[in-house]
Image (cartoon, rainbow, N blue to C red):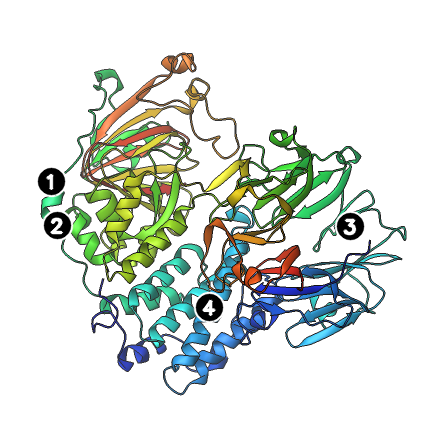
């Protein structure tokens, strides 16, 4: 990142402000601050005051106005943050998420107006994209797209460090009877009749052959395209551990701290990266077989799973069908049928009810004796392969090396 | 229930800033009062209700409104609950701010004239400054004091036991779980130690024992439990990197990871908090994400989120360690009471 004061990455130019300002409605009346849900009246004067500061100046807000705008944005973000954390996420009002998004938008604009480092502005945009709800015709996405080219390119990776990779323990040997069948480009009908309808797992090959990601994606590529972007990272061996936590950091930091250095385990997991960075979405495709489902294509949830060797997703089940596409690296995956659920000892608690208590590769058979009764299938998922995981099928995943997967949840 | 009157100082976020106007700064600023002083304060986020010699008064940005005939307040950003001799009423915040208390209240409940317990406690239950306004409380709790957090409630029984209920995802119930509970449940870990005070913040709780020991539990994301907070350590590492001119973020952060410090994000069971020099606590109060205590020796210690100056140290730095507010010591002010608003700390002081 450029040091403060240097020309690179700092928006000294009024040209950048003009470009950014053009993303907003021309006149103040064009920014009605409409919210899709109820919020407390106390934030309305703050939103209006921020808007006034933005539209008050003839050109770029001066230092005092930018400072006042920054302060208002802080207050809007901090107040709405408390609302975002005031109950289960699904119950958080959309209005409050929009207030948070406005707080991020006004804060990012204040950073640009004040001529400070754009990295902070991009971070604020990302916070709004991650936790807010779209405002002003997705202004945050448009703003970050405008700012990104003005950021300094990420420094090239230290090649020497790439060699220091911790070897992962080998997976259990795959016995013939448990290997998941592999098929090359089956027809829609064949897949539907033999795997989707009877709900049987299968590994599909040849589907990803022409996806641009197979040629384009590498750690360096992500550094260049998304290095400055803030993403949620899971820290800790597995999400059932006490020390497990989530943290926000830039893709560059994630790569240097958890991919290159491999201190402790960090996993960019279950993140809708392709909504946050639409450019990457063009490198992948939605498998045709998803059209066999009842849902709309827009309802398909696409998640990125990017991490070093040794990331573990404990045995768990999901409420939708899943296509798990492997882009680079290999993963050991074990599957259990939902019919065997009783032998898998799911957690009692509400939050973890979809997760087994058993550590698949090191089961405590004294505590969980019936685990041996459960039949399973397994595979080592290789680059270019897509695993079909039927709905509610229990799955355990361990990466054997640096790995990037894309999952498609569909119904 | 006459409370001693005195001089009050405030640190933190002002009602002016809540209205989007420039504020007087993080403080301390003195609460204006007549010769009789102010005896009690009930702070909300954008306004505060104070009890002066002339009765209750609502103070918000640039205005003051008398609330004649009322004895106690329970304010929020949606409603204001007032309790008086006839009973309790709730008005929408806007009605209260504009003085429209003759309008139909959003809620009312007739009560006996003599209150036995302070708000939010009411006979048979407790009040909340938002719908449903009244919630029944089982008699078994025998509550003498009750405090409300963002998602939970903490009650102190006449026997010195602590009961908690409500949202528990951040360990604020103190039962060792991350689960919520609708019914008041005894905090077993404190069962052997009689408590004489309880406090609730946004997502954390605190209690003080008869002997003056402080117990804390819940969310520690800003160091509000005075336990090591990862986010604060990273902020400090980044600040150090920029002050030494080191613009690469990695070295200090890698060091953090290597140190293996036991950061605590959630403390699901009560933990005893040792203050410096084993000082005894007389009063505790919690804001959204910070905590303040008054010691028996009349000093104020604060910790947790400090972005708006609410810790009283004259800056906007958060802290995961209990620190004495030096300004009060320097001025020779003995602290007698502390009440936290969401982003503020109000202290009653005895002037030298």
Badge 3 vs badge 1, beta-carbon distance below 8 Å: no
Instruction: Give the alpha-carbon distance from disc 3 to disc 1, as whole Å.
Output: 66 Å
Instruction: Give the alpha-carbon distance from disc 2 to disc 4, as whole Å.
Output: 38 Å
Mark 2 element type:
loop
Earlier sequence position, callout 2 versus callout 4: 4
Q: Looking at this view, is B186 or B169 the one in front?
A: B186
Q: In this figure, which residue is indicated by the disc labeled 4?
A: A73
Q: Residues within 10 Å of mark 3 (few under 14, many from 20)?
A: some
**Across the whole image, how many numbered discs are drawn on residues?**
4
Same-chain status of marks 2 and 4: yes
Same-chain status of marks 2 and 3: no
Q: Residues within 10 Å of mark 1 (few under 14, many from 20)?
A: few
Same-chain status of marks 3 and 4: no
Badge 2 vs badge 3, beta-carbon distance below 8 Å: no
Q: Which mark is residue B118?
A: 3
Q: Nearer the viewer, mark 3 or mark 4?
A: 3
A117 sits to left or right of A155: right
Q: In this figure, which residue is indicated by the disc labeled 2?
A: A158
Earlier sequence position, callout 4 versus callout 1: 4
Vertical relation: A283 (above or below) B307 = above
Q: In this figure, which residue is indicated by the disc labeled 1?
A: A163
Mark 3 element type:
loop
Q: Which mark is residue A297?
A: none
Q: Residues within 10 Å of mark 2 (few under 14, many from 20)?
A: few
Q: Chain of mark 3?
A: B
**Residue shown at the point (75%, 35%) measured from the top left:** B141
Q: Position of residue A112 (x, y in %)?
A: 33, 73
Instruction: Give the alpha-carbon distance from disc 4 to disc 1, as whole Å.
Output: 44 Å
Mark 4 element type:
helix
Q: Residues within 10 Å of mark 4 (few under 14, many from 20)?
A: many
Badge 2 vs badge 1, beta-carbon distance below 8 Å: no
Q: Chain of mark 4?
A: A
């Amino acid at each position: 990142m450029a040091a403060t004061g240097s020309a690179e990455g700092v928006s000294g130019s009024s040209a950048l402000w003009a470009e950014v300002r053009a993303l907003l409605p021309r006149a103040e009346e064009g920014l009605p601050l409409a919210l899709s849900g109820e919020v407390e009246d106390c934030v309305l004067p703050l939103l209006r005051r921020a808007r006034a500061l933005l539209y008050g100046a003839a050109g770029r807000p001066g230092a005092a106005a930018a400072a006042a705008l920054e302060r208002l944005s802080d207050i809007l973000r901090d107040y709405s943050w408390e609302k975002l954390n005031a109950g289960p996420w699904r119950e958080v009002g959309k209005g409050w998420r929009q207030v948070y998004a406005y707080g991020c938008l006004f804060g990012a604009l204040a950073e640009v107006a004040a001529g400070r480092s754009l990295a902070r502005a991009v971070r604020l945009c990302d916070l709004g994209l991650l936790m807010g709800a779209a405002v002003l015709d997705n202004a945050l996405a448009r703003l970050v797209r405008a700012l990104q080219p003005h950021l300094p390119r990420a420094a090239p990776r230290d090649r020497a460090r790439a060699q220091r990779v911790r070897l992962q323990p080998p997976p259990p040997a795959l016995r013939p009877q448990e290997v998941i069948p592999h098929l090359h480009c089956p027809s829609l009908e064949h897949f539907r009749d033999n795997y989707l309808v009877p709900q049987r797992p299968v590994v599909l090959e040849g589907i990803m052959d022409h996806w641009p990601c197979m040629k384009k994606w590498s750690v360096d590529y992500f550094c260049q395209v998304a290095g400055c972007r803030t993403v949620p990272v899971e820290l800790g061996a597995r999400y059932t551990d006490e020390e497990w936590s989530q943290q926000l950091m830039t893709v560059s930091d994630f790569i240097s701290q958890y991919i290159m250095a491999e201190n402790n385990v960090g996993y960019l997991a279950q993140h809708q990266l392709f909504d946050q960075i639409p450019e990457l979405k063009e490198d992948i495709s939605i498998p045709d077989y998803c059209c066999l489902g009842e849902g709309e294509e827009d309802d398909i949830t696409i998640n990125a799973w990017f991490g070093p060797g040794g990331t573990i997703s404990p045995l768990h089940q999901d409420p939708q069908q899943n296509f798990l596409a492997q882009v680079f690296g290999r993963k050991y995956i074990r599957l259990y049928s939902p019919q065997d659920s009783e032998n898998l000892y799911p957690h009692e608690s509400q939050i973890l009810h979809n997760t087994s208590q058993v550590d698949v590769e090191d089961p405590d058979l004294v505590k969980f004796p019936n685990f041996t009764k459960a039949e399973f299938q397994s595979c080592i998922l290789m680059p270019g392969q897509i695993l079909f995981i039927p709905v509610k099928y229990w799955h355990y995943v361990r990466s054997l090396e640096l790995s990037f997967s894309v999952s498609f949840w569909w119904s | 229930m006459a409370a001693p009157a005195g001089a009050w100082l405030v640190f933190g976020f002002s009602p002016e800033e809540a209205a989007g106007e420039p504020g007087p700064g993080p403080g301390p600023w003195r609460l204006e009062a007549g010769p009789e002083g102010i005896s009690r304060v009930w702070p909300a986020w954008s306004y505060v209700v104070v009890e002066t010699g002339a009765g209750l008064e609502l103070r918000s940005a640039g205005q003051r409104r008398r609330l004649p005939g009322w004895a106690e307040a329970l304010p929020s950003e949606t409603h204001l609950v007032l309790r008086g001799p006839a009973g309790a009423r709730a008005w929408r915040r806007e009605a209260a701010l504009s003085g429209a208390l003759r309008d139909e209240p959003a809620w009312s409940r007739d009560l006996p004239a003599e209150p036995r317990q302070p708000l939010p406690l009411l006979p048979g239950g407790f009040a909340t400054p938002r719908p449903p306004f009244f919630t029944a409380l089982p008699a078994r709790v025998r509550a003498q004091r009750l405090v409300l957090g963002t998602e939970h409630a903490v009650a102190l029984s006449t026997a010195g036991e602590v009961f908690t209920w409500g949202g528990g995802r951040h360990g604020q119930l103190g039962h060792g779980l991350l689960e919520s509970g609708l019914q008041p449940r005894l905090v077993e870990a404190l069962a052997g130690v009689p408590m004489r005070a309880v406090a609730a913040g946004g997502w954390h709780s605190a209690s003080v024992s008869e002997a003056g020991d402080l117990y804390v539990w819940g969310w520690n994301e800003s160091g509000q439990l005075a336990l090591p907070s990862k986010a604060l350590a990273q902020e400090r590492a980044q600040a150090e990197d920029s002050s030494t001119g080191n613009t690469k973020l990695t070295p200090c952060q890698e060091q953090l990871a290597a140190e293996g410090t036991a950061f605590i994000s959630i403390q699901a069971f009560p933990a005893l908090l040792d203050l410096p020099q084993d000082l005894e606590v007389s009063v505790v109060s919690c804001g959204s994400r910070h905590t303040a205590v008054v010691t028996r020796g009349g000093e104020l210690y604060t910790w947790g989120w400090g972005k708006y100056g609410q810790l009283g140290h004259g800056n906007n730095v958060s802290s995961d360690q209990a620190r004495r507010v030096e300004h009060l010591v320097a001025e020779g002010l003995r602290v007698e009471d502390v009440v936290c608003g969401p982003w503020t700390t109000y202290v009653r002081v005895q002037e030298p």
